[in-house]
Image: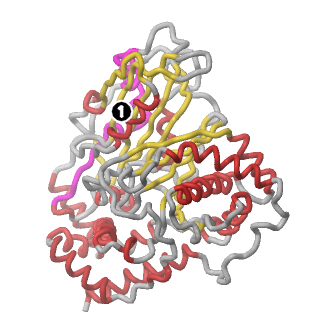
Amino acid sequence: MRQLSELDASFLYLESETTPMHIGGVYLFDASGLRDPLAFSTFVSYLRSRLHVVPLFRQKLKEIPLRLGRPYWIDDPSFSIERHLAYVNLGEHGKQASLMSLASKIMEEPLKRDRPLWHITFVDGFRIDDPEGDKQGFALIVKLHHAAIDAFSGEEIMGKLLEYTPEPRPIAPPRPWLARPEPSEERVFLQASANMLKTPMQVASLAYNAAEATARGLVKKQLQKLPVPFPLFTAPHSPFNRQITANRRIVSASVSLSRLKAIKASLGDVTLNDVVLGLCAETLHRYLEQQGGDTDKSLVAMTPISVRSSSLRKATGNQMSAMLLDLATNEPNPAARIRRIHQNAVESEPYREAIAADRLTELLPSTLLALSARLYSELQVAQRYHPLFNLPITNVPGPQVPLFLQGARLIRQYNTAPLFDSLGLVIVAVSYQGQLTLNFTLCPDVVPDGDSLQDLIEDSLTGIEECLHDLGPDQGLETPHGSGQNLTDEVLGALENMIKGGLQRFRR
């Protein structure tokens, strides 16, 4: 048995009807060069032959009775690949708009917990727009639960499933696989008891699960008594930070990496990631202007950072840190803004040495973390006070060489991330073969006219390029804050003090 970490388990407990916690991807393949179209049955055989490279595809959750501890990953003795696959034919005139609409609906549905937490929809009849005429293609719509992967490991998994050669390889027979016996309830109970002795904080978690309603009332009362330092929550109010519904929409657009690299070279001491964040910031700035929103205060993004290394590499799970970053959206010059974003980043400790996400989950068990998130929504913290941050932005470097599936070339990929209560917009940037795609996962009931973001990306990039010509050598390098302490450390420190103070009150 392999137990989920507190961070992994938190994504299970955060899941609700309106917040499915899976990471998604839409992968478009050009099949015009194939002698015969790729049949769904051929894809099933191909995937069956590749299951051994991704063990999590045949592992399911084993819950602990009474939630005495975090769940375990175990082999699924009744695994059937057919339970994780679906087939859809868009018809001869299926275009990208139809595909993305279908993907949005699929992403709204949570994964079923009685089986391994993944699903792939094979979309046939897809036509790819091309200057020389429509080309025949197909697409894969993939869902993987955030409890099993993060955005970085998800990209690795797709790299393992696909091929690096345009020549279709013979599909090998699947490797023999025998599920390891499922552990007995007695063993699971004893293991959970031993873990509780090691981590006394789980007793508080158990108390919450045994009497959720009572615990929730107690926590609300304690939170109201705590001296909550809301001035530290400096992110401004924005249209993104409202209660979400179950509806989802995926909006994406691609730009050339060479253009972003040229901006980086012109600005000097900035990173390519700073340029990507600057492009996101300018797009959001223009969207807020278009919607009549407030642009006088700067938006704050939560940017996950992978802490994977050769010495700390697991097949699955979340190995992330995070920092809160001022996007300087109140800076009128979008080129100078990139310099300011870089300055804001290097001032933050996570830029040099990432703060592990377990820093808080060690203090707050995953079940109580989920309770805190629900209270954040129920108490309407983001609406009544300033939110902790306005939106997450993740930049995932992808392969710069083409990938194939039985001779069909992967030409584009669009990636999605889960939305949380009071967070109606998430951006995932993924690069592939010289292109960077900005993917907006949004709740259309919170983010109106979300499709306009697609056009705003190109307008924003052009605007940045135009502002480079008149940019002064030191413009954007002014220090905007008088304090040397960064927002991330302030907020994390405040949250730690709140948690410790609340626990001390509970002990009295």
In depth, the one of 141 and 92 nearer the eye is 92
The colour scheme used to paint the residues is: secondary structure
Which quadrant is the C terminus positioned in?
bottom left
Q: Residue furthest top?
A: 35
> Number of marks in the image?
1
Asked if the magenta segment contains residue 55, the reply would be yes
Q: In the rendered structure, which segment of residues is drawn in magenta?
A: 39-65
Please name the residue that numbered disc 1 is placed on.
120
Q: Is residue 321 visible?
A: no
- Kind of residue at disc 1: Ile
Residue 414 drawn at (x, y percent)? 49, 38
Q: Image point 42% across, 50% down: which residue? A: 442
Residue 260 drawn at (x, y percent)? 71, 46
Residue 455 drawn at (x, y percent)? 57, 43
Q: Residue furthest right?
A: 473
Asked if the magenta segment contains residue 361, the reply would be no
In depth, the one of 116 and 140 nearer the eye is 140
Q: Residue furthest bottom?
A: 508
Residue 400 drawn at (x, y percent)? 64, 35
The relative height of residue 268 versus residue 129 in the rendered view (above or below) is below
